[in-house]
Image (tube, grey):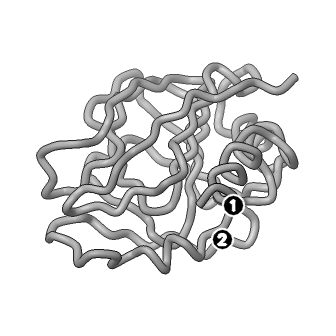
């Protein structure tokens, strides 16, 4: 069964490029029991690979060179997406908890602003993606500063939840086709 994710579109800010692709949230989708091993196995079987297990990352940052996916297996956190370190406006906050999967497109700033219950998640990345590089958005960006790099990060072959042909692939391909 394919589940439609929540979609959050973000405009560029003076300090963060964001992305035309929306942040996607699949609620309560991971198999139980929620733990690191089941979250990792579930997402890896759909063509994404593990690069670490993390707790709350409280500094605003973005990765211009790769998309990122969180498989939350413990606790909860309020995430702020779409706001660089020096931005005072823009962005969206939402809460995620054990069982949720969040996909953050390349260039979208993100951080945890509040967490509880020993918040933990696995970080997985599309097949063939490079190791992430952090940018922080502390200084105003030159127009188009990250456009080429972010544009080179294509639509993944697989949705981390549903595999080939899943919602991420169709939603993001439709946006790419209309550009």
As helix, strand or loop, the secondary structure at mark 1 comes to loop
Q: Which mark is residue 155?
A: 1
Residue at x-position 52% and y-position 44%: 22
Question: Residue at image x 32%, y 34%?
Answer: 92
Q: Residues within 10 Å of mark 1 (few under 14, many from 20)?
A: many
Point out residue 135 in the picture as x, y percentages from the top left corner: 32, 69
Residue appearing at x 38%, y 69% in the figure: 134
Is 127 on the left or on the right of 15, as rendered? right
Q: CB atoms at circles 1 and 2 under 8 Å apart?
A: no
Q: How far across and down, in percent of the image, does residue 31 sit?
A: 76, 24
Whether 19 is drawn above or below 93: the answer is below
Image x and y of residue 93, in percent? 32, 31
Q: Which mark is residue 119?
A: none
Local SS, label 2: loop
Could you tell me residue 76's position as x and y percent?
A: 43, 24
Q: Quadrant of the N terminus?
A: top right
Residue labelled with disc 2: 129
Q: Nearer the viewer, residue 129 or 143?
A: 143
Q: CA distance from mark 1 to mark 2?
A: 11 Å
């Amino acid at each position: 069964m394919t589940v439609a994710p929540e979609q959050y579109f973000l405009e560029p800010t003076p300090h963060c490029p964001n992305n035309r692709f929306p942040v996607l949230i699949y609620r309560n989708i991971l198999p139980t029991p929620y733990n690191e091993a089941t979250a990792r196995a579930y997402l890896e079987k759909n063509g994404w690979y593990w690069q670490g297990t993390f707790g709350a990352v409280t500094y605003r940052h973005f990765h211009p060179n790769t998309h990122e996916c969180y498989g939350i297996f413990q606790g909860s956190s309020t995430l702020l997406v779409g706001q660089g370190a020096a931005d005072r406006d823009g962005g969206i906050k939402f809460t995620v908890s054990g069982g949720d999967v969040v996909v953050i497109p390349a260039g979208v700033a993100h951080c945890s602003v509040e967490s509880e219950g020993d918040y933990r998640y696995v970080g997985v990345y599309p097949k063939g993606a490079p190791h992430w590089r952090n940018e922080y958005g502390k200084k105003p960006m030159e127009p188009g500063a990250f456009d080429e790099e972010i544009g080179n990060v294509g639509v993944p072959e697989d949705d981390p939840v549903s595999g080939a042909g899943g919602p991420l692939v169709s939603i993001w391909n439709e946006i790419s086709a209309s550009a």
